[in-house]
Image (cartoon, grey):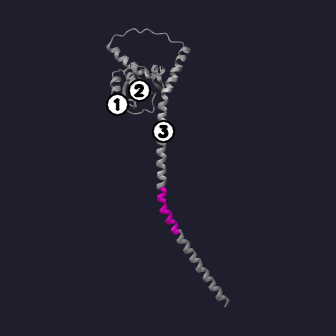
Amino acid sequence: MTYKELVEKVWKSISKGDFSGITEHVAIQFNIFGEAEGAFYVEVADGQVRVEPYEYFDRDILISTTYDIALNIASGKLDIENEAMNGRLFAEGKLSKGSVIGEAIKAASAKKAPVKKVETKKAAPAKKTAKKAEPVKKEAAKKAEPVKKEAAKKAETVKKETEKKVEAVKKEAVKKAEPVKKEVEKKADAVKKETVKAVETVKKEAEKKADTLKK
């Protein structure tokens, strides 16, 4: 699958959701690594959703994952917060906001099918949940490491390229300054010679006058 095909499929899946009841603004950026590598974002605003093939710097959530998990999130089959807890993706930011996608997909399904009563499950004790989350957190950090290294590698390349350009500009400046420097030195030398000549003339004139007074 190509990056372009992925973005189109994400839009096709997510556009099926009913976002009309969602009033908050949510921006989620997906960084895809491996197949279909690239970045795109999903934005929910004023009850509408859009998918764009760009980075979103003022985002609420940043996700690093593979294309298949991104597709399942867009179709409402997977929840961002749960997948992050399970170590299937690396995410940072306000993860709870990621539930708007699943909510919109469910809202659209609810309009097509009778509403079923959902049994509320008891929440796991906080300590037990934290204990389970620890290995998941470590696994997520482990998976995020290659992404961080790749980003650092790209940053280093940009830095070296910038230094190379700066060096080229400095050399060009020095090259352009050389003729000006030579011209200044030439003029200074001419002034120096002219000054020495003038001083010599004054000196001879003074000596001539002195000889005349002696006589």
Amino acid at pointer 3: Ala
Highlighted magenta segment, given as a residue range: 173-187
Which residue corresponds to mark 3? 155
Residue at horizontal 52 percent and vertical 19 percent from the top: 133
Taking the spot 45% from the left edge, 21% from the top edge, the residue there is: 83
Marks 2 and 1, how far apart at CA: 12 Å
What's the CA distance linking mark 2 and mark 3?
22 Å
Q: Which image quarter: residue 193?
A: bottom right
Q: Which residue was labeled with disc 1?
A: 2
Q: Check disc 2 and give the amino acid type.
A: Thr
Farthest bottom residue?
A: 215
Q: Is residue 130 above or below residue 144?
A: above
Residue at (37% x, 17% y) in the render: 107
Label 3 sits on a secondary structure element that is: helix
Q: Position of residue 32 (x, y in %)?
A: 41, 29
Residue 112 image offset from top left, x and y in percent: 32, 14
Residue 178 among those drawn in magenta: yes
Residue 149 in the image, given as x and y percentages of width and height: 49, 33
Q: Quadrant of residue 68?
A: top left
Q: Residues within 10 Å of mark 1 (few under 14, many from 20)?
A: few
How far, Cα to Cα, is label 3 from label 1?
25 Å
215 part of magenta stretch: no
Residue position for label 2? 66
Q: Is residue 165 above or below residue 99?
A: below
Q: Are marks 2 and 1 in contact (CB under 8 Å)?
A: no
Decide which of 194, 152 is in the foreground and name it: 152
User: Circle 1 sits in a helix, a strand or a loop, which is it?
Assistant: loop
Q: Amino acid at mark 1?
A: Thr
Q: Quadrant of the N terminus?
A: top left
